[in-house]
Image (tube, rainbow, N blue to C red):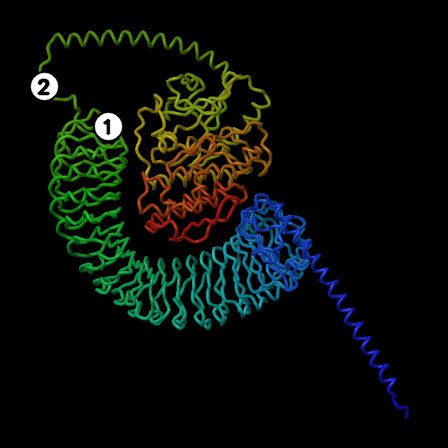
Amino acid sequence: MKLFTPSSSSSSSSYIKLLLQSIVILLLVFTRANSESQSQLHDQEHAILLRIKQYLENSSYLSHWTSSNISHCSWPEITCSNDDSVTGLTLSNNSIFQTIPSFICDLKNLTHVDFYNNLIPGEFPTHLLNCSKLEYLDLSMNNFVGSIPRDIGNLSNLQFLNLGYTNFSGDIPSSIGSLKQLTNLQLQNCLFNGSIPSEIGNLSNLEFLDLSSNSLFPPSRLHDNWMRLSKLKFFFMFDCNLVGEIPETIGNMVALERLDLSQNDLSGEIPGGLFMLKNLNIIFLSRNKLSGEIPDVVEALNLTIIDLPQNSLSGKIPDGFGKLQNLTGLALSLNNLHGEIPQSIGLLPSLIDFKVFSNNLSGTLPPDFGRHSMLKTFLISNNSFTGKLPENLCYNGHLENLTTYENHLSGELPQSLGNCSSLTDLKIYSNQFSGSIPSGLWTFNLSTFMVSHNNFTGELPERLSSTISRLEIDYNQFYGRIPTGVSSWTNVVVFQASKNNLNESIPRELTALPMLTTLLLDQNQLTGSLPSDIISWKSLRNLNLRQNQLSGHIPDSIGHLPNLNQLDLSENQFSGQIPSLPSRLTNLNLSSNYLTGRVPSTFENSAFETSFLNNSDLCSDTPALNLTSCNHSPQSESNDSSWSVALIISLVVVACFLALLALFLSIRFYRKRKSGLDRSWKLISFQRLSFTESNIVSSLTENNIIGSGGYGAVYRAAVDGLGYVAVKKIWDSKKIDKKLESSFHTEVKILSSIRHKNIVKLMCCISKEDSMLLVYEYVENHSLDRWLHRKNKSSSAVSGSLHHVALDWPKRLHIAIGTAQGLSYMHHDCSPPIVHRDVKTSNILLDDQFNAKVADFGLARILMKPGELATMSAVIGSFGYMAPEYIQTTRVSEKIDVFSFGVILLELTTGKEANYGDEHSSLAEWAWRHHQLGSNIEELLDKEVMESSYSGEMCKVFKLGLMCTATLPSTRPSMKEVLQVLLSCEESFSKGESNIGHCDDVVPFLKNSRREHKLDIDIDS
């Protein structure tokens, strides 16, 4: 064996030392090279970021992005890795209006890109697909258009994708299903109009899915494939045009916590598996067509909210709901449920909101309601409940809204309500309650106090809550005088006390209520005179004192109430002459009094034929009023002198001779003219007529002009059997091209076949070489423009006799619905559809019942294909009503009528004209500007008609007007959709379910457009 010598040992040590030195040198070289590489990358990324700043013009929000020695990793918009490489870029909420720079992916290590809530235009920035490491991408709340690129699946590392609140359209690409790492997908509030890919069900890691508010999706079913998403916790698809049944396999989504499928057309029964999901805590299925019974077996014990209103659910409320110890909200309203409320629900310890109104529920209410939870809302109206109210509804002092109207509840109100200082809304009318009102209720924080149609007794309090705006106690048995303390009721807007036993005189203090719009004290036992201080009621619109024992003169000051439109003083003992009354009165009744003198000339017409009956000493020269003639007196019946008789006879003879002479000359002239007219005019009839072309042409005189517009003058012509017809004269003094004339006749023939109650009927067409006459039915109440904006209009000779009164809100809503019905018919029921192109208030005519009839379809073009260029070179329309795309391109589609109709809705709700604003703006722009500034909508509404009972519906219609006037045509609803919303407003208003005084307590309805923030309309209640 060979031994190591000392020299060999020394040689080995030297070798090891040399090796170590080499490794150190290599490490130093590598570290230096890496450091130089990192420094070079840092400088490159710094330069790219400065380029981005330069690209984004007016980027004052990036003023701290400079070329100084401060590292960009310290900038709040930038996230860096441990080696100082840029991994995140967050530029949200900065009003960026440029496209995303194409060189953004030069930041090679980007994993996080956030441009949320800007104004970025254009199509999807496909250069982002080059950011291969991207894990988080948020482009939501921007103005993107076009479709999502089909190769978006190339972003294989993507975990978060939010493209919501944009204008992306078309299909959602199926390639999105290849993003296997995706946990969060948000595509809500877009304009997708293509298919929803089933491949979304392949996203096995998905935890959050939101496709809500995409109502342009074609009718789609919930894919069974999606039910395999076992990690999905949040599933939102409200307002997505879903149809069919909810798959029973939804029970496989075991991680599901929140589900919102509301506002769709889902049908069938609620699958039992849904209520077996152990992690589920919120269910929203409202506004569908679900039927059958609610599953009774409930194992989803973590449920906090069950929201199922406005379906067709039947059966009973499940007993299983009584096991849900965490339940805070239960909403089952507007269904067909029957039976009693399970007693166990009254024991739930977390219940805050309980809403079961508008069902067929019956029986007594569980006595423990409110005792075990912080009950805040208790809405059970429109059912058949009996018995008393639970004693402890406000036991924990949180009850705010108690609504029980339209039931059969009886007995006295719980005395505990007298200590319920949290209560703001009390609506218990139309029951059988009796006894007195607990004293504290009058003085706490109520804003709405509606107890009408019960059997309550007692006297009215001296003091009232300072917050009460609506006090309705009519049809009860309250007695005594109206207290002098009424002067402290300063915020009362509506005071209804009809049909009680109130007596004594009306106190002067009552006239000190500055906000009062409605005062109903009819059918009581009030005596004395009407205070002259009523002049202070500047806001009063409706005054009813019928069937009392009031006497004295009607005070002159009543004529100075600027907003009064309904006045009923009938069946009293008023005497003296009728003072000057407001000309805007819609309803007036002074009958059955002791009034004397002449009826004011303003009211001497058939509209007021029953307003003055049973006043034996009143007179009028208008036969329609059925009163004694003012020229008729005993003295006039005494012996007249013989010379005056002779004079009268002589004058009659001379007048007869002159009349016969004039008649003879007129007949000769008429026959000559008729023969000439018959040779030059040609009549094309669309129905059986009782007149000839000569009857019409002879009426084309200046005295018969009732209007004029861009197409020509409009005349009123008297004809046998019809009274009057309207004649529109077109192309006067211009030679008509034969081709244009033929095209016009063809179009008019099509239009003449239209028969709809809300479209003015075209009866015939009369033409000659240089003129066209269109003969329509005559609509006696003229145009909406004259009624709505009468203060700014001068009337013609014909219209001068028109008796103008204010249009109250119910009439305005009725007119809006009629107009929408006419336009919807032309757009959706005519083939091909017909676009008006000049919808405005002056083209909406009103008959004697204020039914709307849309006029001037005579020159509308037949729409062959939506979006086709108009053949006319000139833009037809009126300033303030024209859609922006029509002004810019003359491109015609049904959506330009929707825009114009939206302006009319804004006119009806605000009372302002379409051209309201400066010379460069309009009413639509004014309304949008206020909406974007967050203005209180109620302050924008027409004070002339707004009452608290109307404000909810007026807010809805105002918001609908905003939606209709959205900049992008694709974001406007169709006329059929608009009509559905208006009809729902009318229905809820007719049921007394209007949102009283609330413009903000609403649910999502309208989607975003390029200039709109989120809008809401509540069409439930």
Q: Hey, what amino acid is under mark 1?
A: Glu
The quadrant where residue 760 appears: top left
Nearest the camera: 762 or 709? 709
Q: Is residue 493 above or below residue 744?
A: below
- How many neighbours does mark 2 have within 10 angstroms: few (below 14), some (14-19), or many (20 or more)? few
Locate residue 429, reporting x and y percent.
Answer: 26, 55
Report the amino acid beneath label 2: Gln
Please tell me whether residue 596 is drawn above or below residue 638 in the rendered image: below
Report which residue position mark 2 lands on.
635
Q: Residue at x 15, y 42 (%)?
A: 508
The picture quadrant where one finds residue 87 is: bottom right
x and y percent of residue 330 in the render?
39, 64
- Using the image as rendered, state which of residue 60 and residue 583 is in the foreground: 60
What quarter of the picture does the N terminus occupy? Answer: bottom right
The one of 254 and 641 positioned closer to us in this rendering = 254
| Above or below for 382 versus 970 | below
Picture disc at residue 856: none
Judge from the rendering whether residue 823 lies leftward or rightward of residue 560; answer left or right: right
Depth check: give the residue in front, 987 or 233: 233
Q: Which residue is mark 1?
A: 604
Q: Position of residue 665 (x, y in %)?
A: 36, 7
Q: Dot 1 lies on which element?
A: loop
- Whether residue 243 is visible here, answered yes or no, is yes
**Residue 150 in view, yes or no:** no
* Dot 2 or dot 1, earlier in sequence: 1
Q: Which residue is at a point 31% across and 38% down the rendered structure image? A: 944
**C-alpha span from label 2 to label 1:** 25 Å
